[in-house]
Image: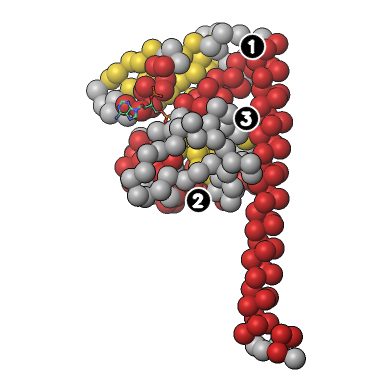
């Protein structure tokens, strides 16, 4: 089994045909805030056209994606992300609260995983994470709108117990959630703190990388100009 490295790095899929590493048992998933909008935008803009179609139900343009990101309501909704060591967003999910209808409190789940990091369980982990958060916020119904052709998304939803209704090219997966428990509250609390710690470690590692880069540049500059070393 592949593991997360000591610095919390998730290895990238090489382009060499090497087998995709298995998902580590625990994947740090962080709740995102308005300050993460630039990283969310970069992640979504990097999705190829086909993925934009799968994610938004239409081949969203850069401008439409920009508007979507600007309008995410972080007070009302939950947005989750999985970061690599450089703090690039590898995967993200948006749990949008739909409000109460006929004594049902529903939320809609949307997700995307960077193409190079698919098939290692990130989509499924984000779905599980969203289920936990939804339960703890008294959401009793999770809804996913997907194209009927989107087999990975429908598999994730079905594996969690969702019922899938197909209507031509569109599909709607509906998952009924049990109420929160003390266990779900504690699980969320521990997961949030662990993910926060992981993020801060990565941020520290990135600053150290940047600093080492600057020192290396200074050394190269000094050496190249025949400065200190040549006296
Ligand atoms: C859908 C998406 C999020 C899945 O992400 P992922 O990290 O690759 O998903 P996972 O690795 O957790 O799991 C995918 C599941 O689908 C299965 N799968 C993959 N390709 C499949 C296929 N062609 N047919 C059937 N099942 C497939 C995998 O085996 C896995 O199931 P398993 O865990 O039972 O083995 C990703 O493909 C994506 O970002 N797509 C573009 C955006 C999108 O479609 N969003 C969903 C609509 S909101």
**Horizontal and vertical percent position of residue 197:** 71, 37
Q: Is mark 1 within 8 Å of ligand 1?
A: no
SS for callout 3: loop
- Which-is-in-front pick, marks 2 and 3? 2
CA gap between label 1 and label 3 equals 19 Å
Quick check: 207 left or right of 43? Answer: right
Please give the name of the residue rendered at 61% of the width and 9% of the height, measured from the top-left corner.
179
Label placed on residue 190: none
Give neighbour class at mark 3: few <14, some 14-19, many 20+ (Cα, 10 Å).
few
**N-term-proximal mark, 2 vs 1:** 2
Image vertical order of residue 111 relative to residue 164, above or below: below
Mark 2, residue position: 42
Q: Which residue in the structure is indicated by mark 3?
A: 76
Name the residue furthest bottom.
231
Label 2 Cα crowd, 10 Å radius (few <14 / some 14-19 / many 20+): some
Query: Which of 117/167 is in front?
Result: 117
- Quadrant where the C terminus sits is bottom right
Please state if 63 lies on the left or on the right of 97 as rendered. left
Count of marks, rendered view: 3
- Mark 1 nearby-residue class (10 Å; few <14, some 14–19, many ≥20): some
């Amino acid at each position: 089994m592949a593991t997360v490295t000591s610095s919390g790095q998730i290895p990238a899929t090489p382009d060499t045909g090497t087998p995709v590493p298995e998902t580590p048992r625990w994947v740090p998933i962080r709740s995102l805030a308005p300050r993460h909008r630039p990283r969310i935008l970069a992640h979504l803009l990097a999705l190829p056209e086909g993925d934009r179609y799968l994610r938004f139900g239409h081949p969203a343009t850069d401008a439409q994606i920009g508007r979507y990101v600007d309008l995410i309501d972080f007070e009302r909704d939950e947005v989750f992300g999985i970061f690599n060591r450089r703090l690039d967003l590898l995967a993200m999910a948006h749990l949008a609260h739909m409000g109460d209808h006929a004594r049902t409190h529903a939320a809609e789940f949307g997700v995307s995983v960077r193409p190079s990091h698919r098939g290692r369980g990130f989509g499924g982990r984000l779905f599980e994470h969203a289920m936990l958060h939804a339960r703890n916020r008294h959401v009793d119904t999770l809804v996913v709108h997907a194209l009927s052709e989107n087999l990975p998304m429908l598999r994730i939803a079905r594996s969690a117990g969702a019922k899938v209704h197909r209507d031509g090219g569109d599909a709607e997966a509906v998952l009924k959630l049990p109420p929160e428990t003390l266990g779900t509250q504690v699980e969320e609390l521990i997961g949030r703190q662990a993910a926060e710690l992981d993020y801060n470690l990565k941020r520290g590692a990135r600053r150290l990388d940047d600093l080492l880069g600057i020192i290396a540049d200074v050394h190269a500059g000094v050496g190249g100009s025949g400065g200190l070393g040549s006296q």
